[in-house]
Image (tube, rainbow, N blue to C red):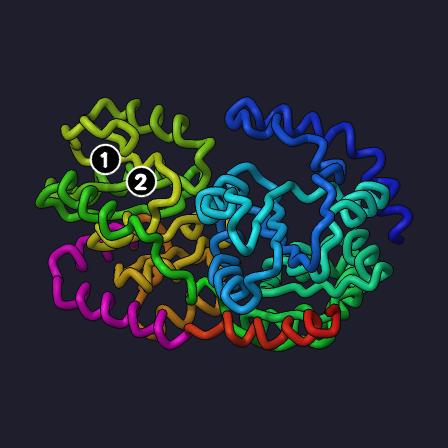
Amino acid sequence: MRLLYSLAWLLLLPFAFLYLVWRARRQPEYLRHWPERLGWIRAWRGGKRLWIHAVSVGETRAAAPLISAWRARHPECAILLTHGTPTGRETGRALYADSSDRSNDTKIEQAYLPYDFPPLVWLFLKRARPSMGVIMETEIWPNLFVASRKRNLPIFLVNARLSERSARNYARFGRLAALAVQSLRGVAAQTSDDGNRLAALGADSIRVTGNLKFDVGAPAKTEHSALELRQRFGDRFVWLAASTRQGEEALLLDALDRLALPDVLLVLVPRHPQRFEEVAQLIAARNAPWARRSKAGDNHLGNVFLGDSMGEMAAYYASADIAYVGGSLLPFGGQNLIEAAAAGCPALIGPHTWNFSEAATEAVLAGAARRVEDSAALVAELRLLHDDMASRHAMSVAGRQFAEKNRGATERTLELIETAWTDAA
């Protein structure tokens, strides 16, 4: 099975680079660092090194509290942070800009993870020379995991989540998936359901540690950015649509028209930055006044504001009266609502939240969020909460309490991986 999987990668490799060229139409960064995707990273000649793989933005931010705690405990240890997307890499660069200084005790280097073809994986491991690997969330790579085991390199899957849909997809390749997860030294699962689904695939040494995203603090610039945004928005009722996906923006703009409340400002923040211009054109086609974050002098807001900036989601939540958390009105599986709860921003979510099923359910039960079945129900809920400040305040308080209650995953995850680190000494 693994031989067939590897042969498939051999056949697909040329198309993988064609895909990078296609993605580069919107994000030119996809044309950079191609040797890294073949395993050719800078050779490591130093001492012990922790390798953390965080494929994109969400995983990179989730890794932040773990990295901070690790640097505090092991200031002598270098860190290799790998990604799969340019936005993930840029997020890591922004978070750890101080580590570009070689005099920093804990050096953090960044690279792309190579494609999961055996020669590329072996070259990567040979040049990276990590002492231990930590893979964030749902990245399961059979050749990488098997090669790591053969090199006696302990690999952990942390902040692990596996939806029912993903579990069914992996189960179609049962033997291959089992081979991959059985190569792991351990798994730190977000929830018991995630742990059970990974166990059904064949994983063992599973511990439920919670979600690292509850431990993510707001960026240092959040308060300043939130104040700046709030001043720009003026005395408006701010409805934030956070991390929206393709097709949702049109639904939300239609919902704004049906809402028919002149004091409401819809702040649209697309999930992927390569879609900023696409969404800008969609808004402009409505032939109504609007503004965007990237044009600081544009204060003629109208009723729509495009949040075309990176790294400011916490500030958007802090400046909003209410938020719709994207990817959940249409079947994308939903985006993370933890940041909204931590900011005390009342949240509305759609019916499709399987990516964060337990967190969404618990947030609703805690009173921090409300679920709507479609855009019509979204409009009705917005009207209700627009006029009910007491309910919004209660949701805000419940959100902060919900976030506080679920913190602590960082310490539990460290307890799991530190034993292997000590053994690797």
Q: Amino acid at mark 1?
A: Val
- Image spot of residue 49 (x, y percent): 67, 57
| Chain part drawn in magenta | 378-406
Q: Is residue 203 above or below residue 141?
A: below
Task: Tell which residue pokes out farthest to the left in this image.
Answer: 235
Dominant secondary structure (helix, strand or loop) of the stretch shown in magenta? helix
Q: Residue at x 49, y 67 (%)?
A: 211
Residue 277 found in image quarter? top left
Left or right of 11 in this view: 245: left
Does 366 appear in magenta? Answer: no
- Image spot of residue 203 (x, y percent): 74, 70
Residue 111 found in image quarter? top right
Q: Amino acid at mark 2?
A: Leu
SS at badge 2: strand
**How many labels sit on residues?**
2
Left or right of 105 in this view: 131: right
- Image spot of residue 421 (x, y percent): 68, 70
Task: Identify the residue under disc 1.
Answer: 304
Q: Residue at x 34, y 34 (%)?
A: 308
Left or right of 396 in this view: 167: right
Task: Identify the residue under disc 2.
Answer: 268
Q: Residue at x 91, y 48 (%)?
A: 3
- Image spot of residue 16 (x, y percent): 72, 32
User: How many neighbours does mark 1 have within 10 angstroms: few (below 14), some (14-19), or many (20 or more)?
Assistant: many
